[in-house]
Image (cartoon, rainbow, N blue to C red):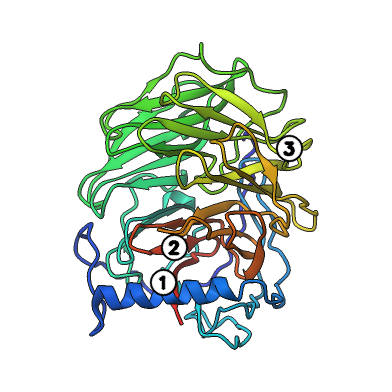
Amino acid sequence: MRRMGQADFRGRVVRTVRKPGRAAGRSTGRGATGRAGVLGALALGVAALAATALAAPGAVAAPAAGPDATGRSGGDRNGTAWSAAGWSGADRSGEARSGGALSGAGWDLKETGTDARFRGLAAVSRTTAWAAGSRGTVLRTADGGRSWRDVSPPGAAGLEFRDVEAFDGRRAVVLAIGEGEASRVYRTTDGGATWTEAFRNPDPRAFYDCMTFFDRRHGLAVSDPVDGKYRMLSTADGGRSWKVLPDRGMLAAQDGEAAFAASGQCLVSTGPRDAWLATGGAARARVLHSADRGLTWTVTDAPIPAGDPARGVFGLAFRDRAHGLAVGGDYRPGQPSPAASAVTRDGGRTWRPSARPAPAYRSGVAWLPHSRTTALAVGPTGTDLTTDAGRTWRTVDGGSYDTVDCARDLGCWAAGEKGRVARLEPR
């Protein structure tokens, strides 16, 4: 979206970022139990959490200031209350959690040493993750979040990174948003030790929001409409080079319609060719689908309220070609967000509102690995859990996060304002 209001970052820098060696893309064991024990414990914790998800949630802190039309946010938080639906223990930030009867699973905040806001997140594994955010900041961890390396591209301090796609601990692509030349793509193959600028937007009318990769070679990035149609940028060499796709197969945008650069999830993909684009800001919220890597598109209205520049679909997640989740609402603090989630079982041809939707604006959503029914949604006022594939949602956490991502080894991460990055942990 077009407006880029200045965010207010007043988070405390908790420590100096350590500089670990280059990361490997594979998981390693932790402690005496090893990888299998950790994953087993986490799986049991998630299962226990799911089993008690219908318990009444605890108090949730007041919302932080919402993003402007680009998906940015300002404001501050005075603390976070945690619900008791299976989430227990104390995180490393000192924020309060209400005690839960069940020792299940919950977010464990990691000290990142920065107050940047992270809306871009890539979970490679339980040990390795990338976060991209404000002031041109890119961080990488190779030890499960115990330490973070600042691998920001040189000269990028004036950029706003909103998406990162990582293939492993060494190879990643980041997207900066903004009008004209502010929209850029950088690529690294050595864990962020060096970066190559792979694309700089030459068109002042274009504003790139999100990015997705089908595999290690093929990917797309989307710009808000130019001449009445969304613009698609494509790569076939892992992000080394990019080209604008012809718009013959792209549908006309509604007046005022655009994508939200709120979580790196307005454009998502699954499998070798399928991609979906979430929209808002116009009379109707919509989801566009392409089955040929962005050459042609179909569109379906989504039952998430729109009709205002602040409303629409903000994040999508698909666990396969058929089953998808949509979240969104109204990002302005204090504004209600009824029907803030929806579900599809036919690849986006039809969308149905959740029977019990996410109770507030949510910008990010992710399926838990190896589950057909369990997913997490996040936003400035909390985390919600579904255990029935999006039909019903329940708030299980009051912490502020903007985006969430999970790796196949059950490494689930969340990120947001004031340098907040957390990993899902067994309790």
Q: Nearer the viewer, residue 193 or 224?
A: 224
What's the residue type where badge 3 is placed?
Answer: Pro
Say whether marks 1 and 3 touch (CB < 8 Å).
no
* Marks 3,2: beta carbons within 8 A: no
CA separation in Å, label 3 and label 2: 29 Å
Depicted 105 relative to depicted 267: above or below? below
Instruction: Say which residue appears at 27% left-offset and 39% top-offset.
Output: 216
Q: Is residue 314 something that shows in the picture?
A: yes
Residue sitting nearer the eye, 229 or 417: 229
Residue visible at 23% across and 57% down in the picture: 25
Instruction: Between residue 398 and residue 50, name the one nearer to us.
Output: 50
Query: Residue 303 location, x and y as percent?
Result: 72, 40
**Label located before the other in sequence (1 or 3):** 1
- Mark 3 residue crowding within 10 angstroms, few (<14) / some (14–19) / many (20+): many
Label at residue 309: 3
Q: Residue at x 63, y 85 (%)?
A: 98
Mark 1 burial class by Cα count in 10 Å: few <14, some 14-19, many 20+: many
Q: Which residue in the protein does label 2 denote?
A: 413
Circle 2 Cα neighbour tier, 10 Å, few/some/many (<14 / 14–19 / ≥20): many
* Whole-percent x, y for residue 345 in the image: 57, 42
- The answer to whether 192 is drawn above or below residue 79 in the figure is above
Residue at image point 71% right, 50% down: 340
Q: Secondary structure at mark 2?
A: strand
Image location (x, y in percent) of residue 377: 58, 58
Q: Nearer the viewer's eye, disc 3 or disc 2?
A: 2
In the image, what residue type sits under mark 1?
Ala
In the image, residue 35 lies at what x, y percent? Answer: 26, 73
What amino acid is labelled 2 in the image? Trp
Proximity of marks 2 and 1: CB atoms separated by less than 8 Å: no
Could you tell which of marks 2 and 1 lies nearer the N-terminus? 1
Which label belongs to residue 43?
A: 1
Element under label 1? Answer: helix
